[in-house]
Image (tube, grey):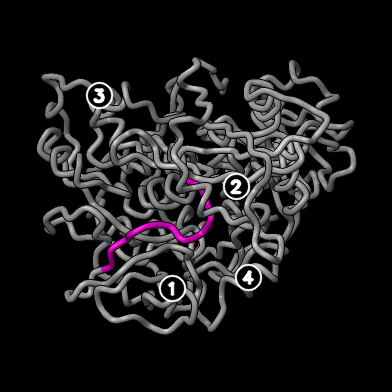
Amino acid sequence: MLDLPRSRWTVVEAVRRQAERYGDREFATFEEGRSLSFSQLDQQSGALALGLSDVGLRNGDRALALLSNGPELLLSLVATNKLNAIFVPINTGLKGSFLDHQLRNSEPRVLLVDATLARAFEGIDLAASSVEVVVVVGDHEGTPPALFGGKTTLPFASLLREGNPEAVTQEPAPNDISTVMYTSGTTGPSKGVLMPHAHCFLLGYNLARTVRLSEQDVYYVCMPLFHANGLFMQTFGCLLTGAQAAIVRRFTASGWLADIRKFRATLTNGLGVMPEFVFRQPPTPEDRDHRLRAMMAVPIAAEWGPDFERRFGVKLVQGFGLTETNIVCYTDLEDPLEPGCCGNVLDEWFDVRVVDPATDDELPVGEVGEIVVRPTKPSCFMTGYFRMADKTVEAWRNLWFHTGDAGRFDAKGRLFFVDRIKDCIRRRGENISSYEVEQVINAHPAVSESAVVAVASPIPGGEDEVKACIVLRDDMNAGPEEILDFCQARMPHYAVPRYVQFLSELPKTSTGKFQKEGLRRQQVTDTWDREAVGYVVQR
């Protein structure tokens, strides 16, 4: 493990130190045979920092990245941070109002985009945005300039400039912002989490300590690098320890075991239904023919968790945390598996309580309430939501960060996750803002109003499915397929509702707020189901 005082906990320092230590040792491999050594990560990010500086990126500016898992994303993070600028990786499934909100909120000076994802900007007025330069990864010549509103566009390779990177490199401090990651809103638009360098460092540091990551390990990273889990916990954890990261574009349940064997992976992470989907693949003679020793996964259900360990011969590790809070507890590798148990609090870094959601009074051991967290060390926690001061204050009421998740402590001081309190939907490992889905549906000319809720997945132990409850205008009609066609063009594929229910009115409180609890409790047996009729959502 890289041994640095906390006063040196920055992305830039970690890259520099490990390049000096490991040199040409392979750090990360990608699809199509591409790779980065520890020294290449430092050298090429320095060359890119020169190019980004030349096009005007400065201290405190934002560089927004719509990039797939690849070396360009890692180089862009480090290069941006070398200028003490802020990296903003966003979900590659975004389009329409979802994408437009994050573009407007972050106000980037530079936009980095994969050529294959460029059409996500169709219908978005980039000409009126803060973007000054668009950097295209891939087929720059084949990308229609009109997509970017007349902004200057450059191929990524052209920004890898020769020269002395030290001439532009600034030394960020641990409390400077490295990255803004957007997390789904529950009562409003998605919020940009301001992540200091020390916060990003600690994500990798604590995971590495928990799974005992070493130079001999290979970490299979099949989660997107626009999430903290893939970028900072797994990939940055490898950087800190000299381990190798084997990074693929996306997770597939059918290809997971073959990849584990191909890359000779010893560790991996799973989120949401990923490990369950792997478990529900047909058993094979190769199920134990691999080097994988542990998998960090949440949540784990009793219906499949213990059987997963027995079938694959892999230890499952659990934890609890958010992009905002870091990971505040982990189970130990020696602990027997208890589904729902998140382990003991990492009290060197965090205070955690379970409180009454109505009063914030601490609850006795065993009682279920809201999990609240605060850091014990500076800069190891988010500093707030970018340009959403009201949301920051709301989350930090009574000097505790309110996670919106329900949990309990047992007599041994272990935290157990129970459920989510916030009105957020989790589907296929993605958090979905019901508010943002409602805003898209409400834009349909036939829709008067809508309420979007989570309903239980029919997959045992699975996550949520999205249900849209819709009131049509009196003089207009629209069928479920028409509504979903409208949604597909304006939101990520994972956010498109599975169930559609038309109602004459939506239940509301006396102050006009939706009463969603009743909508969630309703059975979906008589509700239109796109999977039952064979309606296919395109990625």
Q: Which residues are magenta?
A: 415-426
Eyeballing the image, is 480 above or below 171?
above
Going from N to C along the chain, the mark reached first, 4 or 2, is: 4
Badge 4: few (under 14), some or many (20 or more) residues near its Cα, within 10 Å?
some
What residue is pinned by disc 1?
372
Q: Amino acid at mark 2?
A: Ser
Q: Earlier in the sequence, mark 4 or mark 3?
A: 3
Question: Looking at the image, which is closer to me, 29 or 534?
Answer: 534
Amino acid carrying label 3: it is Gln
Q: Secondary structure at mark 3?
A: loop
Is tag 1's residue or tag 2's residue first in the polypeptide sequence? 1
Kindly identify the residue that appears in the image at 65 percent across and 67 percent down: 391
Say which residue appears at 63% left-offset and 46% top-offset: 451
Find out whether the residues at labels 1 and 2 contact each other: C-beta distance under 8 Å: no
Q: Which mark is residue 281?
A: 3
Q: Position of residue 222 (x, y in %)?
A: 39, 34
In the picture of the structure, the residue carrying the numbered disc 2 is 434
